Amino acid sequence: MKHIVVLTGAGISAESGIKTFRDADGLWEGHDVMEVATPEGFRANPELVLDFYNQRRRQLLTVKPNAAHLDLAGLEKDYKVSIITQNVDDLHERAGSSKVIHLHGELLKVRNVMDELSYYEHKDDIKLGDVCPSGHQLRPHIVWFGEAVPMIETAMELCATADILIIIGTSMQVYPAAGLMHYVPEGTPIYYIDPKPAMESGGDLTVIAETATTGVKKVIGMLE
């Protein structure tokens, strides 16, 4: 059974109604990225940061997986499928995908400020003063800018075993995720789906300048 590795970014969830965090002006929902997505921002104003992610979490609970998520889950009937996502939502899981690696954490999980490796599910708001059993403040289980990406080595290992790589809805500008395509074996077919692609077709790379829902169907048709 061939192994398809899928790398997804904000573009795949945008069609479910989840805003892409970073707008054209570099702001996240009107906030400077340094205010709401760095350890320094959290230390400076934890209430602002907690509220920012509380709003994102509430929105996530109102949306559903779209056709692209569902079509990727459907591939598991005929392929081994590993999804590596830069997204912090759970739409791949809700669509039925069974192997999902979250590079940047998960919005519906929390951890305490002292331990990045111990986390658990949490769908409610996090407030200042909410603590773990050890007495440490809770924070979103999100990898902020400047923090280590714990799952990147696992993602590299998966890419090294890929027979096919599909990249969906990502600018391929944010590292270390952007470098993952270079870990697939030489000669591996790569399909890049994005309405404003940052690369051009050539060699093993096929670029499909479409939204995720349209582009995933096209790629599946090309695989058959």
Image (cartoon, rainbow, N blue to C red):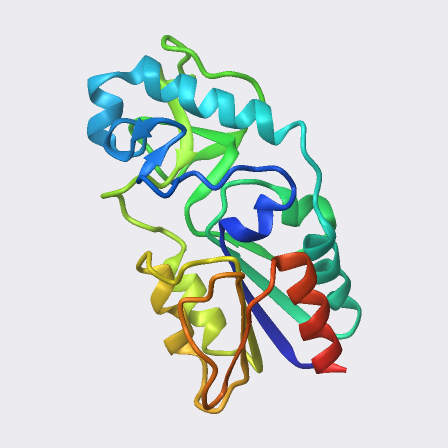
Q: Answer with left or right where residue 88 lies relative to residue 91.
A: left
Say which of 203 and 153 sits in front: 203
Can residue 26 be seen here? The reply is: yes
Residue at the spot x=43%, y=51% of the render? 103
Q: From the image, which quarter does the N terminus lie in? A: bottom right
Q: From the image, which quarter does the C terminus lie in? A: bottom right
Q: Quadrant of residue 208?
A: bottom right
Residue at the right extreme, as displayed: 77
Please, is residue 93 above or below residue 1 in the view?
A: above
Can residue 79 be seen here? The reply is: no
Q: Position of residue 202 (x, y in %)?
A: 45, 87
Q: Answer with left or right where residue 105 lies relative to residue 42.
A: right
Q: Position of residue 64 (x, y in %)?
A: 71, 38
Please, is residue 149 above or below residue 202 in the view?
A: above
Q: Position of residue 203 (x, y in %)?
A: 46, 91
Q: Position of residue 153 (x, y in %)?
A: 37, 63
Say which of 3 and 41 sits in front: 41
Residue at the spot x=41%, y=55% of the render? 151
Say which of 31 and 84 sits in front: 31
Q: Quadrant of residue 90?
A: top right
Please, is residue 107 above or below residue 48 in the view?
A: below
